[in-house]
Image (tube, rainbow, N blue to C red):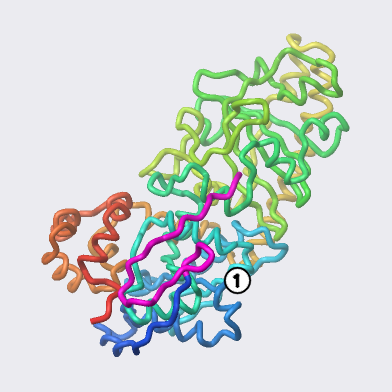
Amino acid sequence: MKKIVLALFILTLGCEGNKSVEGGRPIFVLPNRPAPPIRPAPRPGFYTDDRLQQSIENDLQSLGSDAERQRTRYLVACERHNQNENLEQFEQGVNLGLNRLSAERFINFTTPITESGCAYRVDLDDFSITRSEWELVERASLLQFDIGGSVRGQTIQALTNTRRPWLFATDFIVTAFEGDESADQGGLVYYDIIDQANTTNQFLADQGVILQELVDTEGDILYSGFSQSQIALGKTRLLVFAESDNGTCMGTYDTQLGGDDLFLNPFSLELIQFQGVLQSNKLFKHDAQEWICAQSNGLFGNFRLNNALGNEGGFAEVEAPTNVVINVNNRIDASIRPLDCNGCHFSQIAIPFSDQIGAFILRNSNFDQNEKLLAQRFFKFDEMQAIIGDINRRNRSALDEVGINGNQDPITKAIAEPFRNEMNLAQVAAFTFLTPEEFSERLGGTAISAQVFGNLLNGGTVSLATLSDNFETLSIELNLFQDF
């Protein structure tokens, strides 16, 4: 997929002369006045915005070179720490999410900073994230705010030479994976970061998978089919496992409700035209696909959703239509997005199933000899089960390397779900680095935010969409990230 052209941001900063422009990119310079004293914490261990940014500045100053500082960014979870949450699972989710986005050969880790470890230093090179890709996420992020109104904010902008050198970790993960309707950028963020091609045939070729070649040479490619999928309710699914450069790519062939029936038409296009000879007219006409491929670092990710349009295997999508598959684990949104693949395919990246189609073809008189030979060659469920076991063992080993031993996906449980669900006053206040009491007092004195978020003062909740649409105004009206 083509990289999105970076726009030049014209920013209003709190200190004149903090930014100039060179070669089309903003160049941030150090402020010419000292930072004011850090405001007293409302309680021991609480992180105010200035205390957080001072911690980031101190960490940047400890790095060995300007080059290292300029490839350093921070993901912040201090809003969770301020709510007295244990951050162990959260940190696991941050590291897993970054490594699932990575094209590096090895598992890498963030570095916790601050006394509480509620902010994580990210070396972009460790996760094959470019400066442009970080800027892509910061522009699309759901919680927009300007740190340039404080001396500390201007200093860390200058040291990293970027507008927003830190993001809330929840915001980064949901935005990078386009994991919510509010974060849907049509694939222009997620597929850009993981460098996936727009057409499915090219995506697979980039993994070393050319389906027709694997079929024609009777290589490492197997198919299976069944009708009891947990998410493709009321329909049949065809599966394919194909050897890739890093291990295996697993794919589905899915239909809309009322679409084709696998038990009538059980063959994919590459099976139909095995070795250049038309073998059958029983082509399974699919409407969409899901792919999961092995990564070079041992994890399984490289998630992909695609339609079946055109002659190149379809085009990338970031939302599966609910008439194709249903997200049974999300009570807020029934759509499946790349972020949701983390939760469904966590402890068992290859979900075990019972094959129904191979034996059905062999014993059914409606299939001729050529069709039965295709089933014998490519519908070998015993071999597929062995591959499933190997995939899950490899995935478990990689998760152990990340430091994840539980059976709950930390990306889903610790990061995404609390962010995507309705949020109460304490949760929203935490994103402002104010206590609920101070947040309530300041909110009552605002012009716009008091109306938008007034429901919180009466025990109500707000959605992520409401928070995202109004957070920049909220931060301005509450004087966040400003020196006093």
- Quarter that holds the C terminus: bottom left
Give coordinates of residue 148: x percent, y percent: 35, 73
Q: Quick check: 2 left or right of 25?
A: right
Magenta part, dominant SS:
loop
Q: In the rendered view, would you say 482 is above or below 302?
A: below
* Of 160 and 278, the residue lying toward us: 160
Q: Amino acid at mark 1?
A: Phe
Q: In the rendered view, would you say 237 is above or below 481?
A: above
Which residue is labeled 1 in the image? 109
Q: Is residue 75 visible?
A: no
Q: Quick check: 215 left or right of 28?
A: right
Give coordinates of residue 119: x percent, y percent: 45, 75
Q: Is residue 411 magenta?
A: no
Residue drawn at point x = 76 percent, y = 12 percent: 367
Disc 1, SS = loop
Q: Is residue 18 magenta?
A: yes
For mark 1, does the 10 Å Cα neighbourhood hold few (<14), some (14 to 19), or many (20 or more) residues?
many
Give coordinates of residue 270: x percent, y percent: 76, 26
Q: Is residue 334 visible?
A: yes
The quadrant holding residue 399 is: bottom right
Residue drawn at point x = 65 percent, y = 52 percent: 300
* Of 456 and 31, the residue lying toward us: 31
**Magenta stretch, residue numbers:** 1-26
Q: Quick check: 479 left or right of 193?
A: left
Give coordinates of residue 168: x percent, y percent: 41, 65
- Quarter that holds the N terminus: top right
